[in-house]
Image (spheres, rainbow, N blue to C red):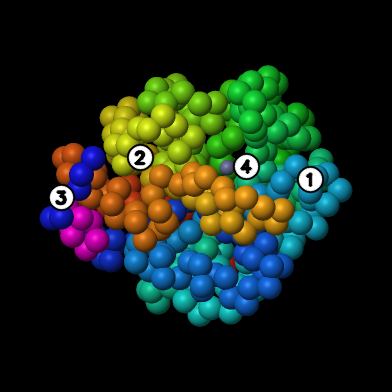
């Protein structure tokens, strides 16, 4: 798909004038690895310029643990990542941690880039549900129960690398984790959860839940993507689906045009569940992969766009294909800001 210059210019202007939100980036883990590798200020050197160019004002940072860190090292690895993220925010006045609506409003007003911290899987707490409160105190404002694996709380949509759906819903502790997370005020993320787990979340969750980084199975079948019924029920409960920009989730594995495929996912979701329920959760992972220790060969790239500075190209593509400017604003950030405005505590109150 060839972008016309006038749409690219319109998109760049939009991104500078309206806040853009990425609801999924493995930032905390990457910062931890890069600091371990001796980098002084990786948030500034790898992200500040690109985020500014892309107009990003809110990033949802996951805390994601690798299999080899579990189970024993999980809690420590999670705390190490949170520590690396908080230190990076402290080092850079252009960034701040968003723990409340007040924080979000201040950060937008001061033209900072706000970071919302969330757990991608709660493996690190095992069955110890009361530790959710400690995570909350550290600034964690959301959680998914599991990544693509089984843990004490739930089962993932498939074992990573094997396309086999794991059956079985939430454990009793998983149900308690949902209840406690909601009591504290955390948002719930169902990306990576299996189908049985999704059904259980629908029964247990009282507040709107989201899929921070999943696409549509009807556009591209992958266990990580959601089927139509799941997308509809998520939207009925006033949740949001964040468009994933990783090639294997988007469906760019056989030479498909990435922009075209990303647009198809957005347009399908908008047509099925409505404009209010679609956002970005780009899940860019190439930079994370570069930082990961043990990396010895040139990796293939997985991100459908080069980095955050190139996201206006997606906006330009949507505009060029006929999407209305007001609708585009909702997708690039407006919907997530509305959601966090509703879900975050009003002030930075502790429990
Ligand atoms: Zn993920």
Residue pointed to by mark 3: 4
On residue 68, which mark appears? 1
Disc 2 beta carbon < 8 A from ligand 1?
Answer: no
Closer to the chain start, of discs 4 and 2, is 4
Taking the image in four quarters, ligand 1 sits in the one at top right
Q: Magenta includes 328?
A: no
Whole-Å distance between the Cαs marked 3 and 1?
Answer: 46 Å
Please identify the quadrant where the C terminus is shown.
bottom right
Measuring 67% from the left and 43% from the top, which residue is drawn there? 121
Residue pointed to by mark 4: 144
Measuring 39% from the left and 49% from the top, which residue is drawn there? 305
Residue 334 location (% of width, % of height): 34, 53
Report the span colored magenta: 7-13
Residue 70 location (% of width, % of height): 80, 45
Q: Secondary structure at mark 1?
A: helix
Looking at this view, name the residue that lies furthest to the front.
Answer: 297
Whole-Å distance between the Cαs marked 4 and 2?
Answer: 27 Å
Q: Residues within 10 Å of mark 2 (few under 14, many from 20)?
A: many
């Amino acid at each position: 798909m060839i972008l016309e210059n006038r749409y690219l210019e319109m998109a760049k202007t939009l991104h500078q004038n309206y806040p853009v939100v990425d609801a999924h980036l493995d930032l905390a883990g990457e910062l931890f690895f890069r600091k371990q590798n001796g980098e002084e200020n990786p948030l500034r050197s790898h992200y500040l310029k690109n985020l500014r160019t892309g107009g990003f004002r809110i990033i949802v940072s996951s805390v994601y643990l690798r299999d080899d860190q579990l189970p024993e090292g999980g809690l420590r690895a999670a705390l190490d990542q949170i520590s690396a993220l908080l230190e990076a925010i402290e080092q850079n006045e252009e960034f701040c941690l968003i723990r409340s609506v007040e924080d979000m409003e201040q950060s937008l007003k001061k033209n900072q880039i706000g970071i919302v911290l969330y757990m991608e899987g709660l493996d690190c707490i095992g069955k110890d549900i009361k530790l959710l409160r400690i995570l909350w105190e550290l600034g964690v404002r959301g959680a998914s129960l599991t990544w693509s694996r089984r843990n004490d709380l739930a089962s993932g949509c498939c074992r990573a690398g094997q396309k086999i759906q794991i059956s079985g819903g939430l454990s009793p502790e998983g149900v308690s984790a949902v209840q406690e997370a909601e009591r504290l005020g955390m948002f719930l993320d169902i990306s990576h959860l299996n189908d049985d787990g999704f059904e259980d979340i629908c029964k247990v969750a009282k507040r709107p839940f989201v899929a921070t980084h999943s696409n549509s199975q009807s556009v591209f079948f992958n266990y990580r993507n959601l089927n139509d019924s799941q997308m509809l029920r998520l939207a009925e409960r006033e949740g949001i689906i964040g468009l994933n920009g990783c090639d294997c989730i988007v469906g760019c594995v056989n030479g498909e045009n990435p922009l075209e495929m990303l647009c198809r996912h957005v347009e399908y979701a908008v047509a099925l569940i409505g404009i209010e329920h679609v956002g970005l959760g780009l899940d860019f992972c190439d930079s994370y992969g570069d930082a990961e220790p043990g990396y010895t060969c040139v990796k293939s790239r997985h991100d459908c766009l080069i980095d955050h500075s190139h996201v206006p190209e997606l906006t330009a593509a949507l505009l060029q294909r006929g999407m209305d400017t007001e609708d585009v604003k909702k997708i690039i950030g407006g919907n997530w800001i509305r959601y966090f405005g509703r879900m975050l505590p009003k002030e930075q109150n502790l429990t």
